[in-house]
Image (tube, rainbow, N blue to C red):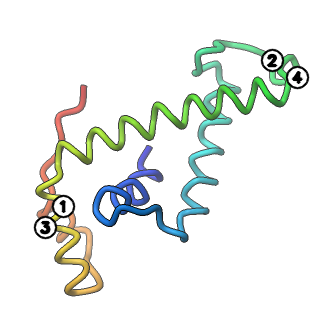
């Protein structure tokens, strides 16, 4: 999930989770909930009212955990590009989409 990438990139680059990532996690949680309700989790197609809050939370956490691991793996594959991009952003404090795209090659997704 793209909404997790910025936070995970900061963890990889700076060694700590950013304090401003709450909105990113809220967005990721909302996506995980929609996935659950659409039957796109390990629980399959289930009625939301048939699940306990703990079951819903567990399925959402598992979905977020898998997404976070995948994001981290993709970022680790691009570690050199990520470092160059981070250095540019730290030096210039801003960057546009073209700068971001030119600084990072598209990862092999599989």
Cβ atoms at labels 1 and 2 below 8 Å apart: no
Residue that numbered label 1 is attached to: 101
- Marks 4/3 in contact by CB < 8 Å: the verdict is no
Kindly report the distance in space between the C-alpha atoms of the residues bearing marks 2 and 3: 46 Å
Is residue 34 rendered to the left or right of residue 53? left
Eyeballing the image, is 6 above or below 89? above
Quadrant of residue 61 in the image? Answer: top right
Percent across and percent down for residue 105 are: 12, 51
Circles 4 and 2: CB atoms closer than 8 Å: yes
Circle 3 SS class: helix
Disc 4 is placed on an element classified as: helix
How far apart are the two marked residues, 4 and 3, measured between alpha carbons? 48 Å
Give the residue at mark 2: 47
Q: Residues within 10 Å of mark 4 (few under 14, many from 20)?
A: few
The residue that disc 4 covers is 49
| Residue depicted at x 68% and y 13% | 45
- The residue that mark 3 highlights is 84
Tell me the crowding category of disc 1: few under 14, some 14 to 19, or many 20 or more residues within 10 angstroms, Cα based: few
């Amino acid at each position: 999930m793209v909404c997790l990438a910025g936070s995970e990139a900061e963890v990889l680059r700076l060694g700590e989770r950013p304090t401003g990532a709450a909105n990113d996690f809220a967005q990721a949680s909302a996506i995980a909930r929609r996935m659950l309700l659409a039957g796109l989790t390990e629980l399959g197609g289930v009625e939301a009212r048939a699940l306990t809050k703990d079951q819903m939370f567990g399925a959402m956490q598992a979905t977020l955990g898998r997404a976070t691991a995948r994001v981290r793996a993709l970022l680790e594959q691009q570690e050199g590009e990520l470092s160059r991009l981070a250095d540019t952003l730290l030096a210039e404090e801003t960057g546009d989409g073209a700068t971001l795209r030119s600084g990072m090659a598209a990862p092999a997704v599989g």
